Each structure stands twice: as C-alpha cells, then as structure tokens.
Amino acid sequence: MASRFSLQLLRRPAQHYTTRCRASPSIPCRFYATADSSAPTSAPFMATLKTELKTAMRNKDTLRLTVLRAIMSHNLNASKTKTPLRTDADLVLAIMRMRRAVEDARAEAKQVGREDLATKADEEVKMYEDIEKLSGVEVLGAPELEPIVRTQVDALYEPGAKTNVLVGKVMGKVKAATAGKIFEPQLLSSLVKKAIQEREEQ
C-alpha cells in the first residue's frame, strides 16, 4: 500500500517535496556531481531558470511555474546550508532528485488507483526532464560509463586483490575522470563489480 507521505507529495505545492527523493524521508536518492574549488557562489544555470520563470509567468504556464518555483525554493534553501548549489552540475543533481520524488509518488498513486494524481505527476516529471535537458549538463548512463570503468579496472586490477578495495579505487578514479558530470552511484557500482568479475574470469 502506498504511504500517506508519498501521496501527499502530489497534493501539495511542488516546493513541499523538493528535499527528499523517495517516498520514505529516510532514504535519500544519491547522485555524484563533482566541482572544482573555483566554482562560483551560484550555479550559472540559475540565470536561465529566472528567465524561464519570467516567460512562464507571461504565458501563464502554471505547470512550468510550479516546477521552476520549486527549483528556486530548493536552491534558496540550499544556499543557507553548508552545501549550496554552486555549479550547474550541483543544481541539475538537485533537480534530478526532485524529479525522482515525483516519480516515486506517481508510482504509489497508481498503486492505489489515483490516476488523477498519477497524471499530474506525469506532467511534472516531463517538465523536470525538459529543464534538465535545458541545462546542458551531461548525465552519464551505462554506455558512457562502461568504457571508463573497463579502462580503470584493467589499469588497477591485481590478481588476489580484495574486490571491495578494488571497487573503491576504481570508483574513485571514475569520479575523477568524469568531473562536472552526473551519474547514479548504484549504476557505477554495478558496472564496476561486473567489470571486475569479467576480468577475474579471463
């Protein structure tokens, strides 16, 4: 049965569900994004979003306004913490988390037969995806990560080495090689373990 918390995500204004990415508030959705020490105090993409907000207001695009205001609210809240969103990668990472929150709520709405809420969530998910693409930040999937992973596994692999130690080393190298880009650590972890297993079987 769907949790009451998750369904409330779709009934409330978007800004109320921007800080957690899963139905349970105790399970954060993690992505990796890297940035250098010379990063600006505010993500450059925020300027684009502000322009998009003005356009949405002129066009009376309620859905886009809701999503953009939620993103800006999240950015403002983050600016008051020790981890502000200084780069576009940081900002898009946060937007992806927000999208995941809506996706989780959509799935649970469908489970309890609330097609009205599921439809609303579908529209919001598409809007978040559009904004992610607008950012120009590269999100790496399996096709992009696999060759990087295999290169690092081949370079670091030693017969008899502990798998968990090798996994950590490879993931560290991959993160360094993909600075400024975003990927899901669960995906990377599975790709690394698979590549190590295949290397051991050679």
Image: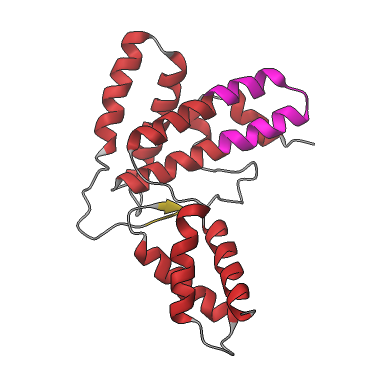
The count of marks equals: 0
- 6 relative to 93, above or below: above
Indicate whether residue 162 is drawn in magenta.
no
Q: Is 70 left, or right, of 7 in this rendering?
A: left
Name the foreground residue: 167 vs 158.
Answer: 158
Q: Is residue 119 visible?
A: yes
The image shows residue 114 at horizontal and vertical percentages of 73, 22
Q: Is 179 left, or right, of 140 in this rendering?
A: left
Name the foreground residue: 5 vs 65.
Answer: 65
- 158 relative to 16, above or below: below
Q: Is residue 80 visible?
A: no
Q: Residue at x 61, y 80 (%)?
A: 202
Q: Residue at x 48, y 66 (%)?
A: 149
The image shows residue 21 at horizontal and vertical percentages of 55, 43
Q: Name the residue furthest bottom.
A: 160
Q: Quadrant of the N terminus?
A: top right
Q: Is 109 left, or right, of 15 in this rendering?
A: right
Extent of the magenta region: 101-123
Q: Tell me the chief SS of the magenta region.
A: helix
The image shows residue 69 at horizontal and vertical percentages of 39, 26
Q: Residue at x 25, y 43 (%)?
A: 42
Indicate whether residue 105 is drawn in magenta.
yes
Q: Residue at x 71, y 20 (%)?
A: 115
